[in-house]
Image: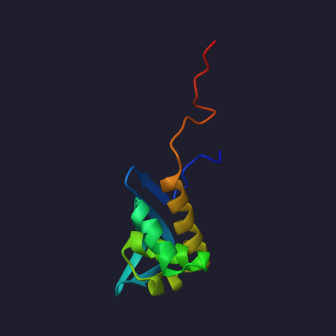
Amino acid sequence: MSSTAIPSWMTLAADRVTVKLTVPFEANSVRVDTLSLRTPTVRDLRIARQTAPNDEEQQDLNLFASLAEVSPKDLDGLPLKDYYRVQAGYFRLVREDELQPDSAETTR
């Protein structure tokens, strides 16, 4: 499997990423087995940085909670493996689109 392959537990669209969780958990008082993050804006990032200026972990938690439309306290209850999946989904969502080496055409 190449490092650019999208994992089976992740669904990626231009404006959203959805992550399948390993175990259901409660978000907004509803039991869910997936979390979706919308594409962040510069404002989202700035607000997350302002809410916890000296705590990068809390900034990430606040940003992911905002993008998933859940509370940071809800995300605190996620198993660590699922939190890592949310992180991976976020970074895949904001990564620059570019040709991958195995799919790029060469010109001679």
Q: In this view, does 92 lie above or below 36?
A: above
Is residue 100 visible from the viewing direction of this image? yes
Q: Which residue is drawn at 54% across and 73% down?
A: 60
Nearest to the observer: residue 106 or residue 9: 106
Q: Is residue 5 above or below residue 86?
A: above
Who is closer to the viewer here, 105 or 95?
A: 95
- Residue at the location (65% across, 48% down)? 3
Across and down, in percent, residue 17 comes to 43, 59
Quarter of the image that includes the C terminus: top right
Provide residue 40's location: percent of width, then percent of height.
Answer: 42, 61
Instruction: Name the side, left or right, on which 54 lies relative to 13.
Output: right
Which residue in the rendered view is the most extreme toward the top? 108
Query: Is residue 48 toward the left or the right of residue 55 in the image?
Result: left
Query: Which residue occupies 65% across, 44% down?
Result: 2
Q: Between 22 and 45, which is closer to the camera in this rendering?
A: 45
Q: Horizontal placement of 56 versus 16: left or right?
A: right
Residue 90 in picture, x, y percent from top left: 51, 61
Considering depth in this image, is 68 or 1 the residue closer to the camera? Answer: 68
Q: Which quadrant would residue 7 be assigned to in this image? A: bottom right
